[in-house]
Image: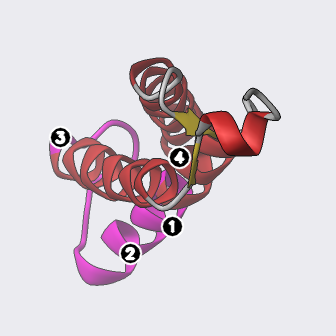
Amino acid sequence: MTVTGLVTAVLVGGVLGVAGHLLTRAGRRVPFWLPPTVGVGMAVFATTVARIAADLPSGFSPAELGLQGLFGGAGVAAVVTTADRRTPEKEGIR
């Protein structure tokens, strides 16, 4: 894994995580740190998969970036859709 791939993975995963948290903020109980962490982890995993699966040139690769977006988005979507729903009973409101 190159430094460029790692930095790109952190940026892509962080952006996807923050966007996923902001889009589902009203209806779900998701800690702020969870979607970006999962997004970064999945994007780093995608970088590893891309490097193992193909003989990519060192540095920036569009295929690697696409896999980072796909894996990061899927991870963030899984986290925010399986999060606990916010209901008045759970919030202590009657």
Q: Measure the C-alpha gap from mark 1 to mark 4.
A: 10 Å
Dot 4 falls on a residue whose secondary structure is: helix
Q: Secondary structure at mark 2?
A: helix
- Amino acid type, mark 2: Val
Residue furthest to the right in view is: 92
**How busy is the neighbourhood of tag 2: few (under 14 within 10 Å), some, or many (20 plus)?**
some
Q: Earlier in the sequence, mark 1 or mark 4?
A: 4
Labels in figure, total: 4
Magenta-colored span? 43-62
Residue at the image point whose x is 73% and y is 45% from the top: 90
Residue topped by disc 3? 62
Cβ–Cβ below 8 Å for labels 2 and 1?
yes
| Residue positioned 44% across, 29% down in the render | 24
Camera sees residue 3: no
Q: Amino acid at mark 4?
A: Gly
Residue 61 x, y percent position in the rendering: 25, 43
- Eyeballing the image, is 46 above or below 62? below
Report x, y in % for residue 2: 56, 50
In reply to whether residue 45 is colored magenta, the answer given is yes
Q: Are marks 3 and 4 in contact (CB under 8 Å)?
A: no
Residue at numbered disc 1: 45
Amino acid found under the numbered disc labelled 3:
Pro
Q: Are marks 1 and 3 in contact (CB under 8 Å)?
A: no
In the displayed structure image, the side of residue 83 where residue 59 appears, left or right? left
Disc 4: which residue? 39
Give the structural element (helix, strand or loop) at label 3.
helix
Q: Is residue 19 left or right of residue 33?
A: left
Q: Nearer the viewer, mark 1 or mark 3?
A: 1
Local packing at callout 3 (Cα closer than 10 Å; few below 14, some 14-19, many 20+) is few
| Residue 32 appears in the figure | yes
Q: Quadrant of the C terminus?
A: top right
